[in-house]
Image (spheres, grey):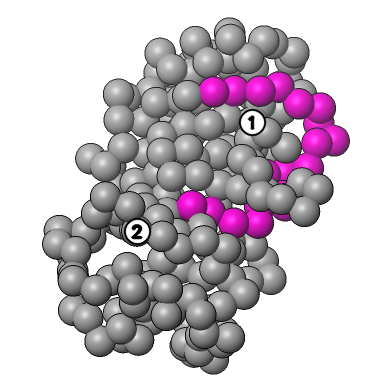
Amino acid sequence: MKMIVVFEKAPRLRHIGHLDLMRAMQRALRRSGLPLCYSQGFNPHILLSFAAPLSVGMPGRREIMEVPLSEEMTAEAFLQKLSSALPPDLPCLEARGVDDRHPAPMALLSAAVYEAKMEAIPEGLSAAIEEFLAQKEIPAVRKTKSGLKDCDLRPMIYDLSLTGGVLRMTLALCEKATCKPDLLLDSLFAFSGLPRPRALITRTALLGEKDGALVPLEAL
């Protein structure tokens, strides 16, 4: 069986990179005494996978990982054992047992929700967002493994709104198309001509698609 686990990467750990986060979680899993599955070979390692790496400097409120187990167990027992081995700033929030044939979270991922908490809200930002989204195309240049590439951000933006000083963004995050929040903010403020304030960006949810609608990934 496999456990689909929802965990939080608190703001205090935001500067920890993905590989360090993976090592920390592997160490906690070893300490937990859970019946884990290991790879074959000279240096066996825990078969652990994450739905999507978090950028350095970004907290995550509902991150998702998949943990294969060699024995059946309840989600409650799994959470109790793993939580006892984790630090307070890396808590596990939920767990759900699924069959080994269940698709990996990474394969089901379609989008992510981000919140940018800005130090100051430039006057006219709400109106600028409306004009920004009214564009049929939003040209930008994004970094890829093969270099810089031109792209159109508009089809990658599912939602963009400003509420109470927090900019909320729902953006594509999958193999076919990915819009990073920093690229969106650069494009938005360049379009508006407004100064871009400093902001703490948090990934608040990972989403998959079901019946044509975006739903929490952990529910799939």
**In the current view of this chain or complex, which residue is farthest to the left?**
120
Q: Position of residue 183 (x, y in %)?
A: 40, 75
The reply, left or right, for residue 129 in relation to residue 205 is left
* Region rendered in magenta: 94-113
Residue 189: in sight, yes or no? Answer: yes
Q: Position of residue 148 (x, y in %)?
A: 49, 89
**In the current view of this chain or complex, which residue is farthest to the right?**
101
Q: Residues within 10 Å of mark 2 (few under 14, many from 20)?
A: some
Residue 30, placed above or below residue 17:
above
Label annotation for residue 84: none
Query: In terms of secondary structure, where does tag 1 sit?
Result: strand
Q: Position of residue 51 (x, y in %)?
A: 59, 47
Q: Is residue 131 magenta?
A: no
Q: Which image quadrant for residue 125?
A: bottom left
The reply, left or right, for residue 104 in relation to residue 139 is right
Residue at 61% over, 48% down:
207
Residue at 53% over, 15% down:
79
Residue at 50% over, 12% down:
81
Query: In terms of secondary structure, where does tag 2 sit?
Result: strand
The amino acid at mark 1 is: Ile
Residue labelled with disc 1: 4
Q: How many marks?
A: 2
Q: Nearer the viewer, residue 156 or 34?
A: 156
For the C terminus, which image quadrant?
top right
Residue 15: in sight, yes or no? Answer: no
Residue 192, placed above or below residue 3:
below
Residue at 56% over, 78% down:
154
Label annotation for residue 162: 2
Q: Nearer the viewer, residue 210 or 10?
A: 210
Q: Position of residue 149 (x, y in %)?
A: 54, 90
